[in-house]
Image: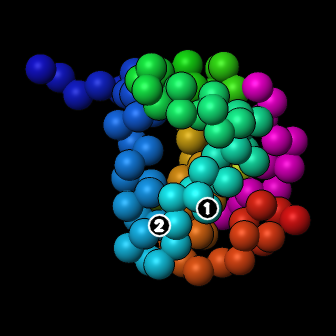
Amino acid sequence: MGRKSIDQMSFASVYPLYVAKAKRKGRTKDEVDEIILWLTGYDSASLQKAILDEVTFKEFFAQAPKMNPSRTEIKGVICGVRIEEIEDPLMKEIRYLDKMIDELAKGKKMEKILRG
C-alpha cells in the first residue's frame, strides 16, 4: 500500500496530532480549534462534522465557509519551506495552519497567532 498524498489524507487523521502537539507545550484543544475556526470560517459544529465525516484535506479547505483574508500575513518557514514561496494553493493553506499550530506550541499569544 502506497503513501497517500496530503490532499487525500483525512483531516481527522492529522487533527489529533495538532491537539497533541499543543497539549505537550501546555496549550489546549480549544486554542487549536480557535486557530482552525479563525483560519477557515468553520464554526465548532461544522468543524466537528468535518472531523467525524473524515473529509480529506482537499475537501476540508474546499468546503471552508470563508478563508480568513488575514492569513496572507502568515510568513516564515515551515518544514524547511518559506510559506510565501509555496505555489500549490492547497499546500499553502495546509502550511498556514501548520505554522499557526507551531506558533501556538512555541508559546505565542493567541492575539499574535490570529494576526490581531
Image side of residue 15 versus residue 61, left or right = left
Q: Which residue lies furthest to the left in this view?
A: 1
Q: From the viewer's perspective, is residue 93 above or below residue 103?
A: above
Task: Report x, y in % for residue 22.
Answer: 47, 67
Choose between 40 and 71: the one closer to the eye: 40
- What residue span does the magenta drawing correspond to? 65-77
Q: What type is the residue that disc 1 sits on?
A: Glu
**Quarter of the figure with residue 107:** bottom right
SS assignment at label 2: helix
Q: Can residue 66 be seen in this view?
A: yes
Task: Report x, y in % for residue 20.
Answer: 37, 61
* Residue that numbered label 1 is attached to: 31
Q: From the viewer's perspective, is residue 42 above or below residue 105?
A: above
Choose between 103 and 110: the one closer to the eye: 110
At x 81%, y 30%, the residue is 66
Query: Mark 2, residues whose alpha carbon is within 10 Å: few (<14), some, or many (≥20)?
Result: many
Colour option used? rainbow
Choose between 80 and 28: the one closer to the eye: 28
Choose between 2 and 97: the one closer to the eye: 97
Image side of residue 5 versus residue 72, left or right = left
Q: Are marks 1 and 2 in contact (CB under 8 Å)?
A: yes
Query: Mark 1, residues whose alpha carbon is within 10 Å: few (<14), some, or many (≥20)?
Result: some
**Quarter of the figure with residue 6:** top left
SS assignment at label 1: helix
Task: Report x, y in % for residue 70.
Answer: 86, 49
Task: Report x, y in % for residue 28.
Answer: 52, 66
At x 72%, y 70%, the residue is 110
User: Which mark is drawn over residue 22?
Assistant: 2
Magenta stretch: residue 87 in it? no
Magenta stretch: residue 76 in it? yes
Q: What type is the residue that disc 2 sits on?
A: Ala
At x 66%, y 19%, the residue is 63
